[in-house]
Amino acid sequence: MAIIELSGEIWQEGNMYSAYCHELDVATAGHTLEEARSNLSEALGIYFEETARKGTLRGLLEEGGFSVGNLDQPGIILSSRSKFRSFEKIEVELAEV
């Protein structure tokens, strides 16, 4: 089984935590940070299972920027061609509304 490296963003919204994987546009939530992280991992697992079942996994990975070789080769790590670097707060002046 191949291994894939993904980035996840988790932030708090009120009393919930939202989790998002940028590379594959998969999101979920949880009541705690750990639950959000676990739910994202589970959602990604379901995403991979379903897309593999439908025969669309390879295409979706390539669309997400991954170099896809032999997905059946054990221990192969798939890395995105674009690397996540950081989140930045950006201030932009709004025009008069």
Image: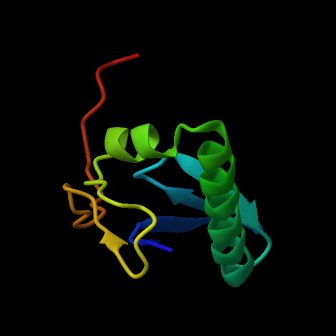
Percent of width and height locating residue 23? 40, 52
From the top left corner, tell me how far across and down residue 5 is, in percent. 38, 71
Relative side of 51 to 30, left or right: left
In which quarter of the view is residue 62 placed? top left
Would residue 14 be seen by someone viewing this image from the given angle?
no
> Closest to the observer: 41 or 55?
55
Quarter location, residue 19? bottom right
Q: In what quadrant of the picture does the C terminus appear?
A: top left
Q: Residue furthest top?
A: 97
In the displayed structure image, the side of residue 44 where residue 71 appears, left or right: left
Which colouring convention does the figure follow? rainbow
Front-most of residues 3 and 72: 72
Q: Is residue 36 left or right of residue 91?
A: right
Residue 28 position by quadrant: bottom right
Observer able to see residue 55: yes
Q: Is residue 16 above or below residue 50?
A: below
Q: Residue at x 56, y 66 (%)?
A: 11
